[in-house]
């Protein structure tokens, strides 16, 4: 019999993934849980195992294609219940029973009759309210003639269907008061993107009017000009880059940021680091200034719990976490990611060093799982590795604070009443002013600085 494997829900409510590569071809025999494809979500690269043992009959999607959750991506010929291969080769429709086929990345989504993932109806605070899944046209105070379908060159769905978009785009539209039914999508199959919403707000939507000329088009060189390789190159905004951009915009325009700076003499901490590296207890562990700073942050949080909290807008509550999932900003070939170490506050210095090393290696290899990218409670970013002294980091969405570590530099510094050459670092702390008052943020930053300036201060804090 023929069985279809539909793209499963890879977690965190992701609605689509891009097929990066196939590990099998038509006619190949595969075993249960054998890796058959590599896909990229907005959060991570994931290997898909086969939920069936059989022969690959058809690959429905090509590498580079973005596929919605619930759509078939590959068909297998498998033995029937009696263990016999089918003789007629008739294609069997995907079962509609509630039971789903398990696989290593979850059970997947239950496909709807339309083959699209289920979406919850949402209300947008505008005159043309989109409250139902199907409507003939936006509700306006006065009747308005619907626009002809041909005015949107990329629209592929019926005008009566709910505008296609992702949850972050719907949230953005809601915040900006935009009726998605009035926005033309320029994404795949008419998908409405964040850029479409912003262009609509600015009155320069590129999705309506085939004759519209953008500023970039106007700057195109004439036939008499020659630019080897072209004047510009374009890279599709997708995957981690797309998610990071959306998250940073959401954070910057939702949480009121405040940033404080503290420059300290970290010579004692660097001397301690050198001693630890030479000791037997830490043999084989990679100890860095980030390791000590992360430990200092975790200790300081015990005295300043407001920086380990979350603003719950929907329930109008402040959620204070009694655990710490420490996010570490990591620059990877796929873009910036912030995986987090679960329950980092329960780890010893050696175990914390081990977790940081494993996190960095996994992130650089592009193998960070969606679970490791969610659930963070506070973050730290090491901009000092790039030779930067200070900055104003943007909060990871949903978190109350982020600490940036500057470069450790040898500088003239007052020490014991004299000027001496010391190792100096600047700490930059950004926090959500709804959750953290200036006094609380200052005390926390001072505690982190005190530990790094004199590690013996830990004895007075724990």
Image (spheres, rainbow, N blue to C red):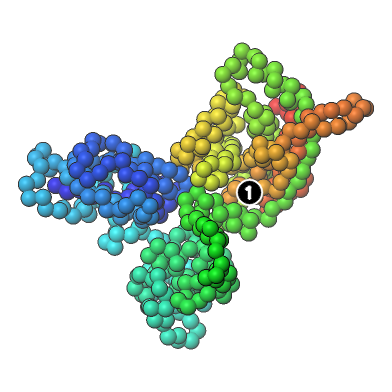
- As drawn, which residue projects farthest toward the right? 417
Query: What residue is shown at x 68% (from left), y 55% (from top)?
Result: 256
Please give left or right for residue 216 compared with residue 44 in the image.
right
Where residue 278 sits: x, y (%)?
66, 15
Asked whether 126 or 215 is in front, the reply is: 215
Q: Is residue 348 visible?
A: no
Please give left or right for residue 383 compared with residue 158 in the image.
right
Image: 127 above or below 261: below
Query: What residue is shown at x 39% (from left), y 81% (from top)?
Result: 148
Where residue 406 sits: x, y (%)?
71, 38
Q: Quadrant of residue 386?
A: top right
Query: What residue is shown at x 63% (from left), y 59% (from top)?
Result: 253
Mark 1 crowd level (few <14, some 14–19, many ≥20, 10 Å Cα): many
Q: Is residue 131 visible?
A: yes
Point out the image quarter for the C terminus. top right
- As drawn, which residue projects farthest toward the front? 224
Asked whether 134 or 338 is in front, the reply is: 338
Please give left or right for residue 211 compared with residue 80 in the image.
right
Asked whether 67 or 162 is in front, the reply is: 67
Count of marks overlaid on the render: 1
Image: 54 above or below 16: above
Where residue 338 sits: x, y (%)?
56, 42
Report which residue position mark 1 lands on: 395
């Amino acid at each position: 019999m023929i069985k279809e494997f539909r793209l499963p829900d890879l977690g965190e409510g992701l609605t689509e993934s891009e097929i990066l590569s196939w590990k099998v071809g038509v006619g190949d025999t595969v075993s249960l849980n054998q890796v058959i494809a590599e896909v990229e979500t907005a959060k991570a690269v994931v290997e898909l195992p086969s939920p069936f043992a059989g022969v690959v009959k058809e690959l429905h999607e090509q590498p580079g294609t973005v596929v919605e959750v619930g759509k078939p991506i590959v068909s297998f010929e498998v033995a029937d219940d009696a263990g016999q291969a089918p003789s007629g080769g008739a294609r069997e429709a995907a079962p509609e029973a509630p039971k789903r086929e398990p696989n290593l990345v979850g059970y997947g989504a239950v496909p709807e009759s339309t083959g699209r993932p289920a979406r919850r109806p949402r209300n947008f605070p505008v005159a043309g309210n989109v409250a139902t899944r199907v409507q003939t046209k936006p509700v306006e105070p006065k009747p308005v003639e619907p626009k002809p379908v041909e005015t949107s060159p990329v629209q592929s769905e019926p005008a009566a269907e709910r505008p296609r978009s992702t949850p972050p785009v719907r949230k953005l539209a809601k915040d900006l008061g935009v009726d998605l039914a009035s926005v033309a999508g320029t994404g795949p199959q008419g998908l409405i993107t964040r850029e479409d919403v912003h262009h609509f707000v600015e009155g320069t939507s590129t999705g309506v009017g085939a004759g519209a000329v953008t500023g970039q088009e106007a700057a195109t060189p004439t036939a008499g000009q020659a630019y080897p390789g072209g004047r510009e190159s374009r890279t599709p905004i997708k995957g981690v880059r797309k998610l990071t951009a959306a998250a940073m915009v959401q954070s910057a325009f939702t949480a009121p940021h405040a940033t404080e700076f503290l420059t300290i003499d970290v010579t004692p901490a660097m001397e301690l680091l050198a001693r630890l590296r030479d000791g037997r207890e830490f043999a084989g562990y990679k100890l860095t200034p980030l390791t000590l700073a992360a430990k200092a942050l975790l200790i300081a949080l015990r005295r300043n719990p407001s920086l380990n909290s979350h603003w719950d807008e929907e329930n109008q509550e402040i959620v204070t976490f009694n655990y710490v999932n420490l996010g570490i900003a990591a620059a990877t070939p796929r873009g910036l990611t912030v995986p987090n170490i679960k329950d980092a506050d329960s780890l010893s210095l050696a175990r914390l060093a081990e977790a940081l090393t494993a996190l960095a290696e996994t992130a650089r290899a592009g193998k960070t799982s969606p679970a490791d990218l969610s659930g963070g409670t506070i973050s730290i970013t090491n901009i000092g590795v790039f030779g930067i002294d200070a900055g104003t980091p943007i909060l990871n969405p949903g978190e109350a604070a982020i600490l940036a570590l500057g470069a450790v530099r040898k500088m003239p510094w007052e020490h014991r009443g004299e000027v001496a050459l010391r190792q100096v670092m600047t700490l930059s702390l950004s926090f959500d002013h709804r959750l953290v008052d200036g006094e609380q943020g200052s005390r926390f930053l001072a505690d982190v600085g005190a530990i790094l300036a004199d590690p013996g201060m830990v004895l007075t804090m724990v």
